[in-house]
Image (cartoon, grey):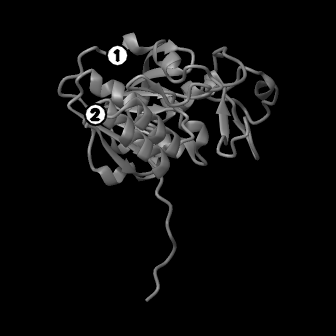
Amino acid sequence: MLRSNAEIRRRIDALGPWFHNMELAGVETAPDHFLGNYPLNKWRKFADAIPADLSGKAVLDIGCNAGFYSIEMKRRGAGRVLGIDFDEAYLAQARFAAEIADCDIEFQQLSVYDVGALREKFDIVLFMGVLYHLRHPLLALDLIREHVAGDLMIFQSMQRGSIELPALDENYPFSTHDLFDRPEFPKLHFVEHRYADDPTNWWIPNRACTEAMLRSAGFEIVLHPEQEVYFCRAAGEPAGGGAVYPSKGPLHD
């Protein structure tokens, strides 16, 4: 159904605020974004590393927000694109954006912790800008590796601290202390209250930590096309046995 620019503008405003600035039939969703034209400016830094033809590929976009990356995958011909997010407000934005872009994309309200319920492996998993919003980030990576990552995962996380990669031994004696004072040692900074006015910014890794977590979850980093973006392939088994499923305690009749 054709919509006028005025109608699209009214619908965008009604669905706002938007975190993804997207151009829907010439109308921007978040033209005053504090990160500029985001996520388009991020996408342009690594888009060329993704095949231009994704025909027949199944894509899962975890934490899809308003669907920017889901739409870009569909525009490259992906056979099936599924976007999931726990926030129904974001999903409403994504459904509208996909409608205006004339892209056949499925969206579901689902947490990353529940990806096992999909019972499906995907050729490409997008896990962009989600890790640092999670209370249990390594568990999320383990679950993705176990349940949905069939081949390639495209990962992005905000990073702070050192960008150096230290040469580390596999083991150190208990008496070692100074190692942990080195800024390049893998660190996952914990935010108790807020960062950038966002109470869901729980963890911020440095570069060494990001890469170590990916390896620990059973991913091989095959490409690093942008400072925060990693292309990974499922390889080997996760350290420590992988995903842990906490017991809910004894059942009582």
The foreground one among 178 and 252 is 252
Task: Tell me the crowding category of disc 2: few under 14, some 14 to 19, or many 20 or more residues within 10 angstroms, Cα based.
Answer: few
The answer to whether 224 is drawn above or below residue 125 in the figure is above
Q: Of the residues under marks 1 and 2, which one precedes in the sequence?
A: 2
Question: To which residue does mark 1 refer?
Answer: 50
Direction from residue 174 to residue 245 in the image, left or right: left
Say which residue appears at 69% left-offset and 46% top-offset: 199
Q: Quadrant of the N terminus?
A: top left
Direction from residue 175 to residue 107 in the image, left or right: left
Residue 145 picture location, percent across and down = 39, 39
The answer to whether 162 is drawn above or below residue 127 in the figure is above
- The quadrant where residue 212 appears: top right
Task: Tell me the crowding category of disc 1: few under 14, some 14 to 19, or many 20 or more residues within 10 angstroms, Cα based.
Answer: few
Question: To which residue does mark 2 refer?
Answer: 2
Residue 81: numbered disc: none
Q: Is residue 145 visible?
A: no
Q: Quadrant of the C terminus?
A: bottom left
Say which residue appears at 57% left-offset and 40% top-offset: 17
Q: Is residue 105 visible?
A: yes
The foreground one among 97 and 155 is 97
